[in-house]
Amino acid sequence: MRTSGELRPGSIKSVTTGFTLVELLVVIAIIGVLVGLLLPAVQQARESARRMQCQNNLKQIGVAMHNYAESHGTLPVTFRGLPPGDAYNNANTGTSWITQLLPYTDKQALYDRIEFGESVTTNLAVAQTILPQWNCPSDSANPGRMTGRANAPSATEFGTQNYKAVAGSNWAWGNFPGLSAPKGRNAGRTNGLDEGNGVICRGGSTPRAIVTRLRDVTDGLKNTFFVGEAVPDWCNHTWWFWFNGSTATCGVPLNYQVANGSGFMATNRGDWPNNYSFMSQHVGGGHFLMGDGAVKFIGDSIEITTYRHLATISGEEIVSEAL
């Protein structure tokens, strides 16, 4: 016998709860707005971290350059290492200034494997090594090793780098407005590629006779570019292969580009002579290592005269624009 408070089986109605279509659409819209607000912030935070890593890479390069100068009395040099008149190819024996810094960037073991005086083919295993410290994390197109490098076997991969020494501002590979022979140490020289007015230039068949000492930087270390950013996807850089891909000019504006195949410095992939300037994947400018070890972010809008003055070591120019 049931009491009055008991319910008979099946007398309880099931109640179904959930979102209506309108409520679901509202929730989806809110989530979409939140993602739209947060995603740029996340991307900005990631890029900020990448920029800090890039700055740190350059700072460490600066420390290495000063330690090298303290040990050798000069800054590192770069040279062809080939007899006069020989063609530029993978049989050449020269190396870039970067190889000389390997012992000062925790790469002594790699440096010890180099057979100096031998061709890049003989040293291929070393030349293919990826050096993370020499690659900017913001350059997603640079995996650290690429094919199609200048004057090297086209199908062979070589280690690449995003940082190039500043060879001055009195030259460019081609004709660009406002370039002139340098003042100071290399006064009257018009071949800036080999004898520019910057800190490290392309050398001859032996280490260049005119090397740079820190005391040669009479414009002041804090007012002189030493190393800047580059984008190896647009030209044939390799950290190893002697001189051509390891220096650049400030005679051409930072991040200067024109349409493929037209004008000066056309950005044709695989043609490094047409892109012998500084470039960066950071929005709005690029990083430069100064002679005193500081790293500055230089904006695209920097006045070209100021930009060129900062690239010389003894031009006696006055730099008035704040960095």
Image (cartoon, rainbow, N blue to C red):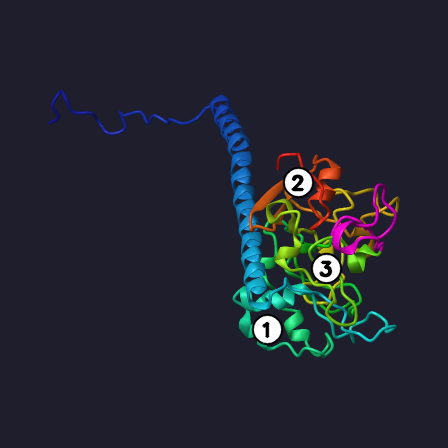
**Residue 29: percent from the left, percent from the top?**
52, 26
- Look at the numbered disc 2 and give the secondary structure of its residue: strand
**Residue 215: percent from the left, percent from the top?**
62, 56
> Can residue 254 be seen in the rendering of this structure?
no
> In terms of sequence position, does the residue under pointer 3 or pointer 1 come before the other?
1
**Residue 134: percent from the left, percent from the top?**
61, 58
| Residue drawn at (70%, 51%) of the image | 231
**Residue 213: percent from the left, percent from the top?**
64, 60
Question: Residue 111: which disc?
Answer: 1
Q: Residue 131: within the magenta?
A: no
- Secondary structure character of the magenta stretch overall: loop
Cα distance in 3D space between marks 2 and 3: 20 Å
Asked if the residue under mark 1 is in contact with the one under mark 3, i.e. CB atoms within 8 Å, the reply is: no
Cα distance in 3D space between marks 1 and 2: 33 Å
Q: In the rendered image, which quarter contains the N terminus? A: top left
Asked if the residue under mark 2 is in contact with the one under mark 1, i.e. CB atoms within 8 Å, the reply is: no
Residue beneath disc 2: 285
> In terms of sequence position, does the residue under pointer 2 or pointer 3 come before the other?
3
